[in-house]
Image (cartoon, helix red, strand yellow):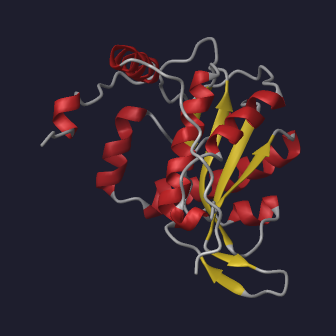
């Protein structure tokens, strides 16, 4: 017999279909202005903004409602320097030895390389982890269901929230990222998912001239 408690669903604000369409279109237009940046200004960002955006991320759906995401928001300059040093070491290995030529050619239009100064310049780094399994106080393990998918959804909501707050982001994924567990002292059941760089774009920031796919190129209605 189930013992969970069912509560009345909170009702959203009453809108007409016309108002819903307008709201959906406005949100899509707002997100269409989002661009990944790699040149950040050192301008401080209040912690309260990051907290509210992380609260938004924490409302994401998750497998069996296990909420397997863990976020570490880093503003400390010395910790950011350690992360940069470790990330650049992995990036040099990638660009110099591990990456196949086809991958390097795909990255070429974006102008990326092993140097990652933004990891120190940006006011915030948010390390995103997922729980591979749950751990009780006695060390007992518990399975996590769909942790990658759950954390991916939460991260997308975090990026959208930060954009809505007027901030720029960069998803950074040096491979491997095990150094984040060491630098940030995370437990063995957590795996790095990505490193999100957060802040204001630099005054002279430039972005690649790229085009997004139109809706009909990636969507089918049946």
Question: Where residue 101 appears, x then y in whole percent?
Answer: 32, 55
Task: Name the one closer to the observer, 73 or 115.
Answer: 73
Q: Residue at x 33, y 14 (%)?
A: 18
How many marks do you count on the picture? 0
Task: Name the one closer to the observer, 163 or 207.
Answer: 163
Q: Quadrant of residue 151?
A: bottom right
Work out whether residue 117 can be spotted: no
Task: Name the one closer to the observer, 179 or 30.
Answer: 30
**Is residue 133 depicted above or below 112 in this figure?**
below
Query: Which quadrant does the C terminus fall into?
Result: top left
Question: Where residue 155 appears, x then y in whole percent?
Answer: 56, 46
Q: Residue at x 56, y 17 (%)?
A: 205
Question: Where residue 216 appears, x then y in whole percent?
Answer: 16, 31
61 to the left or right of 101: right
Query: Which quadrant does the N terminus fall into?
Result: bottom right
Question: Where residue 131 appears, x then y in whole percent?
Answer: 64, 68
**Is residue 112 depicted above or below 62 in this figure?**
above
Q: Quadrant of residue 166?
A: top right
1 to the left or right of 76: left
């Amino acid at each position: 017999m189930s013992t969970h408690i069912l509560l009345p669903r909170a009702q959203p604000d009453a809108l007409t279909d016309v108002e819903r369409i307008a709201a959906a279109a406005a949100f899509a237009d707002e997100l269409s202005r989002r661009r990944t940046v790699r040149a950040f200004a050192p301008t401080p960002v209040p912690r309260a903004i990051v907290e509210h955006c992380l609260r938004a991320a924490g409302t994401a759906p998750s497998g069996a409602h296990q909420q397997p995401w863990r976020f570490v928001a880093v503003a400390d300059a010395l910790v950011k320097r350690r992360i940069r040093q470790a990330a650049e070491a992995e990036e040099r290995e990638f660009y110099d030895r591990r990456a196949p030529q086809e991958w390097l050619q795909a990255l070429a239009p974006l102008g990326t390389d092993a140097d990652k100064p933004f990891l120190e310049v940006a006011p915030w780094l948010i390390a995103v982890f997922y729980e591979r399994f749950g751990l009780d106080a006695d060390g007992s393990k518990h399975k996590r269901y769909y942790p990658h998918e759950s954390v991916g959804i939460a991260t997308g909501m975090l990026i959208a929230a930060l954009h809505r707050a007027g901030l720029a982001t960069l998803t950074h994924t040096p491979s491997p990222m095990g150094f984040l567990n060491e630098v940030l002292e995370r437990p063995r059941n957590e795996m790095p998912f990505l490193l999100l760089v957060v802040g204001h774009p630099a005054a002279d920031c430039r972005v690649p001239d790229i085009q997004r796919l139109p809706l009909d190129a990636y969507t089918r209605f049946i």
